[in-house]
């Protein structure tokens, strides 16, 4: 009986992980950490400029707008 409970919990955990990694949540965010080690467009996982700047603090990196996000936003107003 105990093995059945563990198997059910394991299956539920795997399903929760798979659901959270859906393509809808795999979008890139608004700001990218850029610099020599990141290249272009860089590490684009930041939803706010402040988050990006905190990560860049103490390094030679800088933050810029995600080019994919910028082109999507520009297309909305045409």
Image: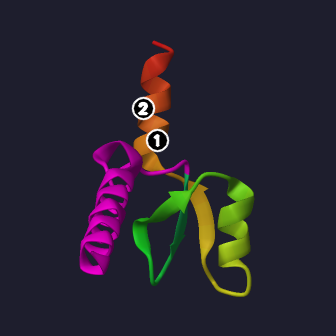
Task: Give the x, y percent position of residue 65.
Answer: 56, 51
- Residue 24 image offset from top left, x and y in percent: 35, 42
List x then y, in percent, for residue 21. Answer: 34, 56
User: Number of marks in the image?
Assistant: 2
Which portion, as a residue range, is magenta? 1-30
Q: Is residue 10 magenta?
A: yes
Give the labeled residue for mark 2.
Answer: 72
Task: Report crowding for label 2: few under 14, some 14 to 19, many 20 or more residues within 10 A (C-alpha).
Answer: few
Q: Is residue 2 left or right of residue 73?
A: left
Q: Estimate the spatial distance between the alpha carbons at disc 2 and disc 1, rounded to whole Å.
A: 5 Å
Q: Secondary structure at mark 1?
A: helix
Mark 1 surroundings within 10 Å by alpha-carbon count, few (fewer than 14), some (14 through 19), many (20 or more): some
Instruction: State the residue lying farthest toward the bottom.
Output: 58
Q: Residue 48, relative to residue 7: is it above or below?
A: above
Tell me the quarter of the image containing the N terminus: bottom left
Q: Between residue 43 and residue 2, name the one nearer to us.
A: 2
Task: Give the residue drawn at x 31%, y 79%.
Answer: 2
> CB under 8 Å between callouts 2 and 1?
yes
Q: Which mark is residue 69?
A: 1
Picture residue at 35% right of the left edge, 67% below the top: 9
Rendered-image quadrant of the C terminus: top left
Q: Secondary structure at mark 2?
A: helix
């Amino acid at each position: 009986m105990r093995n059945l409970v563990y198997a059910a919990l394991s299956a539920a955990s795997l399903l929760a992980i798979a659901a959270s990694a859906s393509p809808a949540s795999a979008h890139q965010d608004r700001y990218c950490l850029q610099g020599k080690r990141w290249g272009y467009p860089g590490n684009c996982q930041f939803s706010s400029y402040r988050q990006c700047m905190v990560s860049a603090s103490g390094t030679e990196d800088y933050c810029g707008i995600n080019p994919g996000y910028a082109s999507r936003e520009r297309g909305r107003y045409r």
